[in-house]
Image (tube, coloured by chain):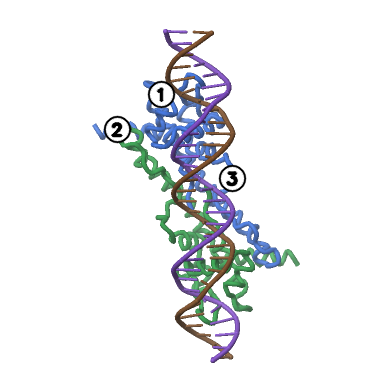
Chain colours: A blue, B green, C brown, D purple
Amino acid sequence: MKITSRFTVAVQTLLVIVRFSQTTKVTSDFIAASVQVNPVVIRRTLLSLKAAGIVEVKAGSGGASLCRDARTVTLYDVFRAVDAVEGAEGELFHFHEKPNPACPVGRNIRGILDPHLADAQRAMEKELQKVTLFDLAQELRAAEQRQN
Amino acid sequence: MKITSRFTVAVQTLLVIVRFSQTTKVTSDFIAASVQVNPVVIRRTLLSLKAAGIVEVKAGSGGASLCRDARTVTLYDVFRAVDAVEGAEGELFHFHEKPNPACPVGRNIRGILDPHLADAQRAMEKELQKVTLFDLAQELRAAEQRQN
DNA sequence: ATTTGTTGTAATCTTTTTGATTACGACGAT
DNA sequence: ATCGTCGTAATCAAAAAGATTACAACAAAT
């Protein structure tokens, strides 16, 4: 009933990059220490983010950095980047796969329900589009200041 | 990355009830035949829906029926009814559970991200609230007519 | 050129979640 | 009393998600 932690891992990954890439070489191990997952999980996350054109990763020497203005990267972009992977066709809701075509309800349920579910998903995505990485970085700075 | 099929199973269950309860005794086996899942899955679904005050089920003699006006039952109600079960606290997004408190990002990520995720979820739920069982039943009738 | 640190990626394993299935006692209607 | 059905527990199997190990490729530094 949940959305994979891959998404929140990706967001934290990006925030770590934004927060530290000026001062440190941000390796997958470095990020993994902040998120507290296995570095390979971070590498895979970075792979997705790279494929989406959000970060670039220096192979060999190491280190990841944003390759777009943080103002242009929304949570939606991140959501898409990490979820497009794997078999999932990006559908949030999950249908049981074989409603009985011999039953009028089974035969029509998909056609009836699908558009509504798509609407719901779109509404959620639209909300994610409102938040940029830049916003989050600002909120982070504010939070850090409060803590001093 | 998906929402359990429990939800779509529940919706179809309710549609079958609405569509057939006038003419047939709608048992868990009957519904199971339309959804094509094991009858026990339907019984459990009905249990959730009953707990939410959406249906009533006659033990012994069998048969389920709506116990509210279909106009007042929204997809959101169904969503809540079937998801409240199990450990889930109704959070759509899933956080990796142990961001490192020693890292400024790890320490603050929850506080920063949670409100945005809640907004996104709320937006989706608001969309689900717009659709009632009555709407779906109407769409079903229209679809059936087209098929004749 | 060799070393060093890091990434890309495959393979494997474990855990968790989900749904299927079996089983059976309780109950209501006939 | 019987019959069909529900409520519910127990068990199983399959799928999904991560964790972990391992290692080749690669870039930079020496």
Dot label at residue A21: 1
Q: In x, y percent, where is residue D12? A: 54, 60
Disc 2 is placed on an element classified as helix
Work out whether mark 1 precedes mark 3 in sequence or the reverse, and give the earlier one: 1
Q: In x, y percent, where is residue B12? A: 59, 64
Identified by mark 3, the residue type is: Ala
Q: Residue at x 34, y 36 (%)?
A: B100
Q: In x, y percent, where is residue C11? A: 57, 37
Dot label at residue B7: none
Q: Residues within 10 Å of mark 2 (few under 14, many from 20)?
A: some
Identified by mark 2, the residue type is: Glu
The residue beneath circle 2 is A144
Q: Is residue A136 above or below residue B42?
A: above
Q: Residues within 10 Å of mark 1 (few under 14, many from 20)?
A: some
Q: Chain of mark 3?
A: A
Q: Residue at x 54, y 68 (%)?
A: B40
Side of A20 relative to B73 (left or right): left
Q: Is residue B43 above or below residue B79?
A: below
In which quadrant of the rendered view does residue A86 lie?
Answer: top right
Q: Chain of mark 2?
A: A
Q: In x, y percent, where is residue B60? A: 52, 81
